[in-house]
Image (cartoon, rainbow, N blue to C red):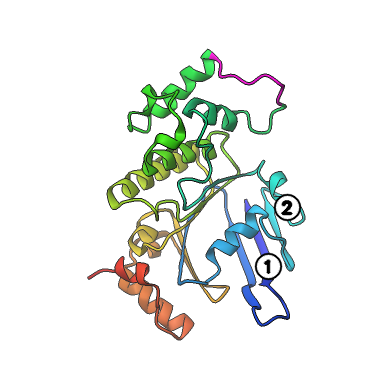
Amino acid sequence: MLEIKNVHKTFNPNTINEKKALKGIDLVLNEGDFVTVIGGNGAGKSTMLNMIAGVYPVDCGSIVIDGIDVTKLPEHKRAAYIGRVFQDPMNGTAADMQIDENLALASRRGKRRGLKFGVSHKEKAAFTELLASLDLGLETRLTSKVGLLSGGQRQAVTLLMATMKKPKLLLLDEHTAALDPKTAKKVLDLTTKIVERDKLTAIMITHNMKDAIAIGNRLIMMNDGKIIYDVSGEEKKSLTTTDLLAKFKTTSGEELDNDRMLLSADK
């Protein structure tokens, strides 16, 4: 489903601000894989997702999604294969548009658009059913402006929009980091439900080690632009946060210095 081969990325090359963000990333995801990604600040996690999405061009290497080489495709063309939810709930939706209008934009993704824009009765009925599945009371607020929603409600709508067309690959970039713990859990539960129900292939970056262990079937640890640990199946299920901290120290030769990750560790 996803194959990344020897991808390198350096920002501001040959300057005092040179940053080697990715150093020969190799990664293969099978269809239906739900991979959680952890690592310290500057490990290359978000850069890897941005490279997959086409935000930045690769310096060298290749990226293949569902058998299609997208390495040289611009971001807007890769969007046909990718759904994405960002850390900031303000991204991914149009704040001044209604909930049903946002969902209509997502449902018509990739289709030819005419001069007339409106939400049909059939679409409204389908959106009402979708929103009811969130259990957030949004099914009665189709005409509310998205900008008036809480962060959790808005992130849930963004998740619906990103998965409505069942993308080949779903990218989740710390999409619960800006939410309070209770709301974050609700959005994570919803994420797991949608990924499992639609059999999506997904990559989720998180700083919460407990979530990284509990969610998905595979876990990847990154450091200094490289993948330093890759675990799946029963071995992943049996991990503890203490194991992850020890693995980080063993493979990287240094202590983890990310406060958010350390706060999520077992006490």
Q: In which quarter of the image is residue 190?
A: top left
Considering depth in this image, is 154 or 224 the residue closer to the camera?
154
Q: In which quarter of the image is the C terminus?
A: bottom left
Is the magenta region chiefly helix, strand or loop? loop
Asked if residue 139 lies left or right of residue 12, the reply is: left
- Say which residue label 2 marks: 70
Near mark 1 (Cα within 10 A), the count class, few <14, some 14-19 or many ≥20, is: many
Locate residue 253, reporting x and y percent: 46, 86
Locate residue 14, reporting x and y percent: 73, 80
Locate residue 223, reporting x and y percent: 51, 75
Asked if residue 197 lies left or right of residue 84, the reply is: left
> Cα distance, mark 1 to mark 2?
13 Å
Q: Which residue is drawn at 37% across and 27% down?
A: 132
Q: Residue at x 68, y 33 (%)?
A: 110
- Say which residue label 1 marks: 7
| Highlighted range, magenta | 113-120
Q: In this view, does 108 lie above or below 248?
A: above
Of the numbered discs 1 and 2, the one sitting upstream in the chain is: 1
